[in-house]
Image (cartoon, grey):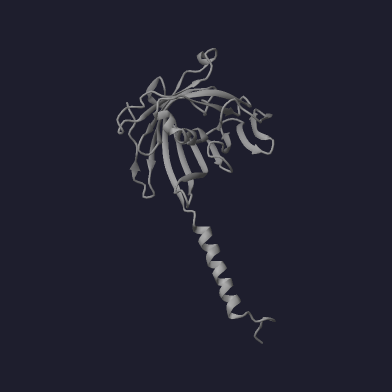
Amino acid sequence: MIWQPLIRPSARSLTTSVLFMVIALLSCNSQAKQLINYLGEARALDDADTVVYREEHQLWQQQDPQTGQWRPLSRQVNYYSADGELIAQKRNEYPGLASQPDFMLMDFRQPYKEEAKRTTKGLRLTLSEDGDVSSDIVSDSDYPLVVDAGFDDFIRANWTTLLAGDSVPFSFASAARQSSVNFELQAQNPDAANNEPLKLTMTLNSALLSWLLDPIELEYQRQTQRLLRYRGISNIPDADGDGQQVDIRYQYFDNNSAAVNTKATD
């Protein structure tokens, strides 16, 4: 016996259903996605011959069908020792602003974890270290709040201002401190040739506290607005759990694994 529907759909209703299915499928596929792979090699800031660790980045982006702009969806970073051992891992999710992703960083060498997660009350920052867990919520900040890798998108969002030679203040969420810290970005060579990297410095936005942290130096390729080099305090401690200063150079790859956009200054 062949099963028959109790109510046979009319040709019109069937056509309408098919049309809605096609529209739904087109809507699902209207936002293109792409995967960007890039590597970072961190060397000791005071010893260019010493490789401290390597970073392996996988960044998923989605394209806005109306503006054509790409925005981040998720990111995973694997950190490897100079010997190739996986020592840490970080995951970013972007539920809201590109400059304020959720993140979780785990150090596999010791019981250490940092987290930031958006809640209805604000940004919850959590630190887990040696079995102790502390957490607090940042609900406001002096300047636009930037979280973890969101500083990269924050720089691109303020690209025109930086090229004009103006400083850009922001508050950086620190899971280790469970608070935000005020910084200021400034371009050092805004008028240089287009084939020269844009050099930026990131300093504490306080004359009284600036001596506590050396300026962080960044280099961006002007054509792609991609980070080429980072010089300063690392988010990965050394094997003893102490902070370390590094010089990281980044190398990007397209979908065919051809290296692109890799030239930073010496």
Q: Left of 132 or right of it: where is 95?
A: left
- In the rendered image, residue 229, in percent from the top left (x then y), is placed at 40, 30
Residue at 36% x, 34% y is 221
Q: How many marks?
A: 0
- In percent of width and height, residue 239 lies at 52, 26
Decide which of 236, 141 is in the foreground and name it: 141
User: In the shown orientation, is residue 235 left or right of residue 220?
Assistant: right
> In which quadrant is the N terminus drawn?
bottom right
User: In the visual, does 97 lie left or right of 217?
Assistant: right
Q: Residue at x 41, y 22 (%)?
A: 45
Spot occupied by residue 160 in the image (x, y as percentages of width and height) = 42, 33
- Residue 51: x and y, percent? 41, 28
Residue 232 visible in the shown view: no
As drawn, 125 above or below 68: above
| Quadrant of residue 46 within the rendered picture | top left
For this rendering, which residue is in front, 18 or 66? 66
Which residue is at 62% across, 24% downward?
177
Q: Is residue 121 visible from the viewing direction of this image?
A: yes
Report the residue at 64% width, 31% height from top: 125
